Structures are given as C-alpha cells and as structure tokens.
Image (cartoon, rainbow, N blue to C red):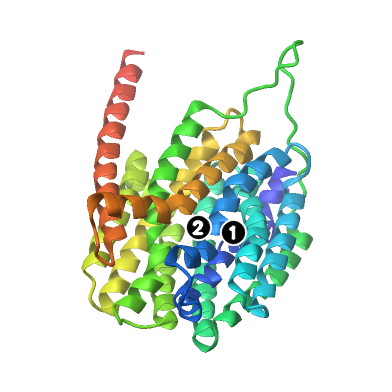
Amino acid sequence: MNEQKNSSVWVQVAALSVALLMYTTSMTTPALGEIAKAFPDAAPETIKLLSTIPSLMMVFFALVSGKLTQYISIKKIITIAMILMFVGGIPSAFIGDLQFMIAMRFVFGAGYGLVFPMASAVIADLFTGQQQNKLMGFRSAVGAAAGVVFQMMGGILAAYNWRFSFLGFLLVIPIALLIWFKLPDTGVKKSEKVDQSGTTEKKVTPITYILALVCLLINIVQFSFMTNIAMVIQADGLGNAAQAATVLTVFTGAAFVLGLMFGNVTKLLKQFTASFAVMTVGLAFVVLIFANSMTMLIIGAVIFGMGFGTFNPAITIAVAKSAAKPKYAAVAISIYVSATGIGQFISPYVLKFLRQTLNLTATRADWQIAAATLISGSIISMVLVGMYSRKTDEIKQVV
C-alpha cells in the first residue's frame, strides 16, 4: 500500500497542496497599510491583530489538531480546517467593520491552526526516507509559491480596495477539491497501551520541547518582517500596498527556490543547516534596516527568503524525527507549530516592550532587535552543534 502511495504522482500533489492552505493568511498582509488608513483611529497593534490572530489561534488549534489524530484521520482534520478557513475569510470582503474582521480572523485562525501541522504531518505519514525529505523541501517550496500568488493578488486587490483582498480566500475551493478526491485517508493514529496499569506510550521526547522553544523565540523577532514591512514602506514613503506585496512576493519566491534546493543544501551544510539559515535571516534584517529604496528592500527580502526557505524544512524534519515513534510525528509537529504561533502572536507586544526598555524610537527598531538576536543566536547555535558533533564522533570512535 505504501509503495502505491509513494509512486502516485497525484497523491504527492494532493499532499503538497495542503501546504497551500498555510499561506492563504498572507493574502491580507499587504493590505495592512491600507486598512490602517481606512481606520485612522485604530492603534497599529490593533491593525496587526488581523495578521497575528491566526497565529494566536494556531497556538491552541495546532495542539487540538495533534490530539484529534487519535480520534479522526488527518484527511478529515484537513477538511474541517478548510471549511473554517473559507467561512472565516470571505465575509470580511463585504463587511468592513474592523471589529467584525477581527472576529472573523478568530474563525479563520481556528482552521489555520488545524491545518498548519497537518501540512507536514501528512507528508511524514505517507512517505519515508529520502522521498520524505525531498517532499518536505517541496512542501516549503510549494507554500512559498502559493505565497507569491496570494501576496501579489492581495496587494493588487488592496490597491483598488482593501476589502477585495479577502476575496482571495475563494482559492480554498479548488484546493479542497484536489484534497478530497486524491489524498488517501490513512485512518486514526491510536495510542497503544504499554502495561497493565493503563499507562500509554510516550509520544514525544524532550528534544521536541527544546526545538519548540527555540522556534518560539525565533518567531518573536522573525515575524516582525511580515507585520512591519507594509507599514515601514508606507511610513518612509517608499510605496503602497502593491509595493509591500512585491517585497513579500520576492521573499516567498526566494523561499520557493531554496525549498526546491533543500536536499542539496542539507548535503552541503549537514548539521549546521538550521543554524546557517538563522544567520542568513539575521543578515537579511541588517540589509532591511539600512534599505532606503525598493531595490534594497527587495535584496533584503531575497536574503530573508533564502534563510526562511532553508530553516523551515530543516526544523520541521528535526521535529518530526524527535517524536517517540514515527506515527506520532503529527503530535510532535503540532507542539512545534503551537510554539511558533505563540511567538508570532506575542511578537508585536514583546518587541514593543523591548523597544521601550532599550529606548529605541526608529521606525525599524524591531528589525534592529531581530538582527542582533538572530545573528548572536546563530553563532551560539553553531558552537553548540559543533561541540555536540565532536562529542558524538569521539563516542563512536571509542565504541
């Protein structure tokens, strides 16, 4: 059965198409600047809720998603998620009240939280070995390609009227049809009893929680690129929603290319892949800090996309492998995704606290914090990984 799954092109396409759903939230990101202009009395943090609420909901519903795999199949979870995303996305195109849009983002976010870990879990469930690694890289590439389409479409629509950007959620319909007809239903991942006392087997390991914490911290600073780019462009007079969409599209385009190249990148960088990716993102923020033109912003976005496109599949594979057993990869991924969502949601508030504490007043102060944090963190990570690798090699030689 597994061989048939692995050999079916349509199954692979359907599995990868789940990643498209993760990037539908980027449809409205380029419109944040225009929405802020439409609601001038709203605080910037309130406008940013339209971007961060899905991340908040991801915190809870990613964990729900992992738990649900013990009761219903991955395919059914994805189906429920798609319905919630459609219902939570479309109405805001017709009703322009800010409070209503925020409420709808909670509904959309519930579906977003359910589907996010499943985009990786479905690959871990259906494929193994090198094919799994290749498809995990392709997952990032496909998602990035979707981001290009969604962001450009959102920016173009928002340039006419910011409400139109929400119409992009109609794209959920063809994605849903492909998944319903071509994705196999692999059933429920039930826990197994290990002794007569009723204790169930362990699903994840301490490494799972360590990786989740690292991703939480990284996303606090990394997410400032997505939430701030439209407002920075607007504040510095570099363009409007369409230009913000261009920068975000370039970022996702670079992530797409690196996703396709992920297999070769890991062969070159080996255990340092994730650390090098974080360093690359940090350097991207340095470029963005000093960018005084669209050209420089685009260069920064390219570098950012290269780092992001490498880090995402690297950390996802590491998290999946940290599960106590392969069948619990979805549970491990749901914990990691939840931590990522926490980092993204609290990002504006933590960065605001840090700005005030450090007395930073520049428009791009958040990016200054991000650059310093990511570069220093990546250096520390490389040192620790190097020490661990040497120790492991010494143990192997003794044995």
Q: Secondary structure at mark 1?
A: helix
- Crowd tier of the residue under label 1, counting other residues whose Cα lies within 10 Å: few below 14, some 14–19, many 20 or above: many
Q: Tell me if residue 138 can be seen.
A: no
Residue at x-position 42% and y-position 71%: 248
What is the three-letter code of the residue carrying label 1? Ala
Look at the numbered disc 2 and give the secondary structure of its residue. Answer: helix
Residue appearing at x 34%, y 72% in the figure = 232
The disc placed on residue 249 is none
Q: Residue furthest top?
A: 196
What residue sits 77% from the left and 49% below the top? 185
Q: Position of residue 27 (x, y in %)?
A: 55, 72
Type of the residue with mark 2 = Ser
Q: Is residue 191 above or below residue 218?
A: above
Give the x, y percent position of residue 174.
71, 71
Which image quarter is the N terminus in? top right
Q: Nearer the viewer, residue 176 or 155?
A: 155
- Residue 140: give its label: 2
Viewer-nearest residue: 159 or 361 = 361
Q: Residue 19: which disc?
A: 1
In the image, taking residue 247 as reference, residue 195 lies left or right, namely: right
* Residues at marks 2 and 1, CA–CA distance in whole angstroms: 7 Å
Q: Is residue 208 above or below residue 264?
A: above
Q: Position of residue 208 (x, y in %)?
A: 50, 33
**Pointers 2 and 1 in contact (CB under 8 A)?**
yes
